[in-house]
Image (cartoon, grey):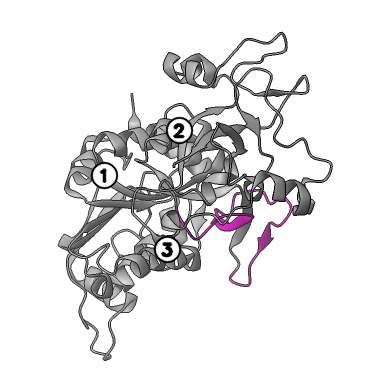
Amino acid sequence: MNLGLTAAKTAKKDEFYTQYVDIQKEVEAYLEYDHDTFRDKTVYCNCDDPFESNFFKYFAANFNRLGLRKLISTSYDGSSIAGGQVTFDEYTAGNEEREKPKAICVEIEEVTDFDGDGAVGIEDVKFFLENNPHSHRPLEGGGDFRSEECIELLAEADIIVTNPPFSLFREYLDLLMEHGKQILVIGNMNAIKYKAVFPHIQSNRLWLGPSISSGDREFQVPQSYPLNAAGSRVGDDGNKYIRVKGVRWFTNLDHGRRHEPLNLMSKADNLKFNKKLEGKLAYEKYENYDAIEVPFTAAIPADYDGIMGVPISFLDKYSPDQFEIIWQASGNTRASTPQDILIRMGYSRHKDDRGGCSILGGKRTYDRIFIKARR
């Protein structure tokens, strides 16, 4: 199987370039919790064209402030966004000669005031790379994150930070978790429901990052990308941008928000004072699970000791110190649910049962996560 070609074809459809400010906000949240989060660490951006990647740009520009030991970035064959932030003569001589760019690896171990302007930043990185050809090299395996070359780099790294192709998210996360890496990657919120992803969240080996908790995010896309969706635009820089809904950071780096407990009201006070509950089916028992329905996070009762079904957006506010995650109800997850969990949730078949969904009033609810308060 030609891994590089496969990845290039797939990833080109998902080639969404994360905005610098979104990376900055997320990383700063970890530094506020632990200033040494990245100190003496090798950061590997393994789905990033250094010609345009804001991940590479951010970590290169902040190399010394973060205290990095090393920064590695690898692209893949066929990356369709061409030159801008960093240019190397042997790889770029104008966009016309980079129609079919080849995968490259960039490695830097120091950033000093190479250009002598009195400041240290991305311009010094550009100066260093342009004058040190040993720091960047072509990749024979096409740059696929599953290739032998990239897995060797993965083994060397401490923290993986990137925006992987959403369509390959399951396989991508499997690889990183298998190698026991710390990660900070962007994915779609729907990935939470994947049977290859959710068990990591349930067991607190993976959680959501702090800086994105609702709405959508804007990404740069290749010039060939159609701008059909609402919110898409062409920027003043001539680049194309689209807005993607349901984006989240997935990580196993600790941050302060996940240790902040929710401030909740009792069941009685919610029913009396929570205006959002008007017209909602709340605290009713599901017909196929021994759990109650909680339609949104702010309605979680502080005085209920049983199992509750909450929307998956609950994970934006989830503190493992306050709640235990039991399982989820979505699609066909019941087929892969361990028997002891089904017994614990009091699962019973229902004539309208469709896979792992929860049934309320004879109808399936939206996707739910089952939780229980820690006492």
Where residue 32 appears, x then y in whole percent?
37, 70
Residue under the point 61% across and 59% down: 240
Locate residue 152 relative to residue 303 in the image: left or right.
left
Find the distance from the CA under tag 3 to the CA under tag 1: 21 Å
For label 3, the residue is 54
Q: Earlier in the sequence, mark 3 or mark 1?
A: 3
Per the image, the residue denoted by label 1 is 181
Mark 3: amino acid: Asn
What residue lies at 37% left-to-right and 41% top-to-bottom?
204
Residue 296: % across, % down? 67, 45
Reply yes or no: does residue 68 show up in magenta. no
User: Where 7 falls versus 102 (above or below)?
Assistant: above
Disc 1 crowd, CA 10 A, few/some/many (<14, 14-19, 20+)? some
Q: Tell us which disc is closer to us: 3 or 1.
A: 1
Q: Secondary structure at mark 1?
A: loop
* Residue 299 appears in the rendering: yes
- Secondary structure mostly seen in the magenta stretch: loop
